[in-house]
Image (tube, rainbow, N blue to C red):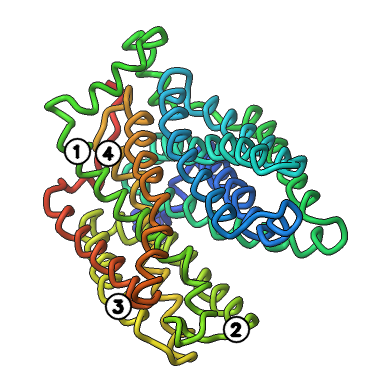
Amino acid sequence: MQEAGMSKNKNYPQKDKKWYEEINRNQWKTVIAGGLGWALDSMDVMLYAMVVVHIMSELQLGTTQGGLLTTITLVASGIGGMLFGLIADKWGRKFSLTLSIVTYSLFTAACGFSQTLTQLIVFRFILGLGMGGEWTAGAALVTESWPAKHRGKAMGLMQSCWALGYAIAALITAIILPKYGWRAVFFAGILPALFTLWIRGHVEESNIWTTDREKRGRVNRNIMNNILELFSPEYKKFTLLAFGLSLMHLFTYWGLFSWIPGYLSLPPEKGGAGLDIFKSATWVIVMQAGGWFGYVLFGFIADSIGRKKAFTIFFTVATVLVPVYAVTRNEIALLLLGPFLVFFGAGFASGFGPLIAELFPTHMRATAQGIIYNSARAVSAFAPLVIGSLAEVYGLGPAFLLIGACFFLGLILLLFLPETTGKELESV
């Protein structure tokens, strides 16, 4: 009897591992590196939004000049994403990530020394280069380090850190601005540079990239070859479709969410919701909570049911939600709809890193992610201007209908993309 009992215990089925138990220490470190880099990126970029009114007052700038600085930063981020993608494919994901963080940290702090609009434009432009570069390098490092079945989760965790960085920027401003002024707020932006010391000492380079470099001998490869290969017959279709989806995403994000605070606070006769300052801020904070969950959960959903199905669900709901939100004036309805709008209207951003990574081979992966995503980011820099121009004629609410149309366009583009969920990233 005892022998039978022992046999039964021996053959008793073990519980399956939880997904997070399948991730090793280095893989977690890549997400920490990419995620914190992205959060600190968000923090440095959003510090400007927090103090722009004070900058305009001291430097005697108008609203057009204040908006121009945002556009310049976004255009530069597109250029930076392409540049650092090439660097990541040539010299490594870890090196590119470190360099991008140092770049945006140093030039955020430099903004605090600006005495003229010209100086601020130069510093914001170089800051933007690092901003775009961080996502490119971080996305390549994370997607290549994590197993295929959990790649979406990894990028969801990384992408969600943007919302955390936004909150950190608000906290820093609240602490420093009243006592020390807007220049000191920018000086705090140097702190992310210290984070690179941890990356250099604790994060390993992508094994896939290292193996590919050794097998192909690509240390001296002309990086222009990677750019040309994006438009070769083999990859041109994927390049154009991924660019179209990226442009749809970034145009809708900057076109919609850069104007949401204004929409909430503008009086109804000007096409807004007419909320006071306190309510507008509260409504925006509640919305960002929905965004955080959207970023994280999209990765889990995409790993479970597939990239295309997950994108389809989010795009479909966003196509409906944007027009509904645009015509809503009831305060409680706006509060309740807001988190869902950001959840479905922005959460799918987590899917672009894995999607582009799975469409292109290792030797050109970071180049593809950098050029496709960030060229779309550069074009989308004009989204706030387009929506603002339409709002002058029709009001912000009706102008948001263009955003709903963009989500519908995204649904059409999805029809032509292959399903890539579970694809292993081969080194050659």
Residue visible at 48% across and 91% down in the picture: 332
Residue visible at 34% across and 44% down in the picture: 376
Query: Which mark, residue 279?
Result: 2
**In the figure, residue 378 lies in which quadrant?**
top left
Residue visible at 36% across and 11% down in the picture: 218
**In the figure, residue 17 lies in which quadrant?**
bottom left
Report the number of numbered marks: 4
Q: Secondary structure at mark 2?
A: helix
Q: Secondary structure at mark 3?
A: helix
- Disc 4/disc 1 C-alpha distance (Å): 11 Å
Query: Which mark, residue 358?
Result: 4
**Marks 4 and 2: which is nearer the front?**
2
- Disc 4/disc 2 C-alpha distance (Å): 43 Å
What percent of the width, then of the height, locates residue 135? Answer: 47, 41
What quarter of the picture does the N terminus occupy? bottom left
**Marks 4 and 3: which is nearer the front?**
3
What percent of the width, then of the height, locates residue 392? Answer: 40, 71
Q: Looking at the image, can residue 149 be seen?
A: yes
Q: Mark 3 or mark 1, which is nearer the start of the sequence?
A: 1
Q: Looking at the image, can residue 14 be seen?
A: no
Q: Mark 3 or mark 2, which is nearer the start of the sequence?
A: 2
Q: Mark 1 or mark 4, which is nearer the start of the sequence?
A: 1
Q: Nearer the viewer, residue 211 or 168?
A: 168
Residue indicated by mark 1: 238
Residue indicated by mark 3: 323
